[in-house]
């Protein structure tokens, strides 16, 4: 039996914890409900906790599977794992294979896009749901380049280590209404990264990878024409300070038949700020053929 951390709020996250040893480390995941599988892929600096509202509602009709990437949440934090998006994607692919998840609906947010969408590009997903995410090089976006250079450089490394910058500075600023990030919710994201060294080992590589993994994103974008064949839903928090409306427009151009739901008051985490609206959008989408 793996001990449960004292900080974990089981009232907010009332799911059975499961663990699976993979080739690079042991991952924590939840597997709730029965029916066609939905695979939830989180980004940074969060973990499967961010999907709790969606899973609690959708498990009534679907099988909801959500893992914590290595280093995040309740998963193992191996010292020799590179913590790049490509490495997380390979780990996720192994997880899907081990669980024998056949053609799940992919639900991806933030870094969950470049981590999870390779499954769709490889023909291993039936539908996709995109929540404020991306799958292309970011070096043609001046604002994103400026931010990425700041957080991915030496100063950013120090800010991650000593200020816990992604959780204490970036995360609150990306909410549509900061009051929605209550102290109780924020604690569930802060606690896994009390250790300063872990912030540098796990979180900062993804900050550096915003520009540093350009070739990886380019390899995904080169395969983009495989995506329009899949039914797609895009739910976008329009007050997101990280992913602006012009990035939504890029998805719209690629996926002209996608269902688009714009949430005017929500920020980067629409499923945290407007979970009811996101659940309804997904339910309607999954009810279509």
Image (cartoon, rainbow, N blue to C red):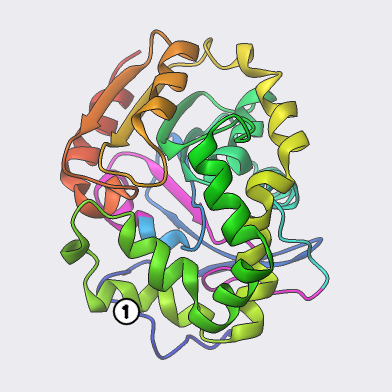
Question: Within 10 angstroms of label 1, few (less than 14), some, or many (20 or more) residues?
Answer: some
Magenta stretch, residue numbers: 51-79
Query: Where does the image place residue 75, in percent across and percent down from the top left?
Result: 60, 70
User: Which residue is rendered at x = 32% and y = 44% of the image?
Assistant: 240
Relative to residue 249, is residue 89 drawn left or right? right
Against 246, residue 28 (above or below) is below
User: Does the magenta segment cover residue 28?
Assistant: no
Q: Count of labels shown?
A: 1
Against 253, residue 73 (above or below) is below
Name the secondary structure under disc 1.
loop
Q: Residue 215, can we see it? A: yes
Query: Where does the image place residue 281, in percent across and percent down from the top left?
Result: 24, 31
* Residue toward you, 25 or 254: 254
Relative to residue 217, is residue 3 drawn left or right? left
Q: Which residue is mark 1?
A: 9
Quarter of the image where one finds residue 84? bottom right
Could you tell me which quadrant the N terminus lies in? bottom right
Relative to residue 260, is residue 137 drawn left or right? right
Query: Where does the image place residue 129, in percent across and percent down from the top left?
Result: 41, 31
Q: Residue 49, can we see it? A: no
* Residue toward you, 156 or 121: 156
User: Which residue is rendered at x = 30% and y = 24% of the image?
Assistant: 285
User: Which residue is rendered at x = 56% and y = 17% of the image?
Assistant: 227
Could you tell me which quadrant the C terminus lies in? top left
């Amino acid at each position: 039996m793996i001990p449960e951390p004292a900080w974990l709020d089981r009232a907010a996250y009332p799911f059975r914890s499961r663990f699976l040893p993979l080739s690079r480390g042991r991952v924590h995941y939840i597997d709730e409900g029965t029916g066609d599988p939905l695979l939830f892929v989180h980004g940074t600096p969060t973990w499967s906790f961010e999907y709790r509202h969606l899973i609690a509602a959708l498990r009534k009709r679907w099988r909801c599977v959500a893992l914590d990437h290595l280093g995040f949440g309740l998963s193992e934090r191996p010292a020799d794992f590179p913590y790049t998006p490509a490495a997380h994607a390979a780990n996720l692919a192994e997880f899907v294979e081990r669980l024998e998840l056949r053609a799940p609906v992919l639900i991806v947010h933030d870094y969950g896009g470049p981590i999870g969408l390779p499954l769709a590009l490889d023909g291993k997903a039936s539908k996709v749901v995109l929540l404020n995410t991306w799958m292309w090089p970011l070096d043609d976006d001046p604002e994103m380049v400026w931010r990425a250079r700041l957080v991915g450089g030496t100063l950013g490394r120090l800010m991650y280590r000593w200020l816990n910058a992604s959780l204490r500075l970036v995360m609150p600023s990306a909410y549509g209404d900061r009051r929605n990030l209550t102290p109780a919710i924020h604690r569930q994201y802060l606690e896994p990264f009390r250790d300063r060294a872990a912030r540098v080992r796990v979180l900062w590589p993804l900050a550096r990878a915003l520009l540093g993994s350009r070739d990886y994103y380019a390899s995904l974008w080169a395969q983009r024409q495989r995506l329009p064949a899949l039914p797609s839903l895009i739910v976008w928090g329009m007050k997101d300070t990280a992913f602006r409306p012009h990035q939504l427009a890029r998805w719209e151009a690629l996926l002209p038949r996608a269902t688009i739901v714009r949430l005017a008051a929500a920020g980067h985490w629409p499923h945290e700020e407007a979970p009811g609206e996101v659940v309804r959008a997904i339910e309607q989408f999954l009810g279509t053929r």
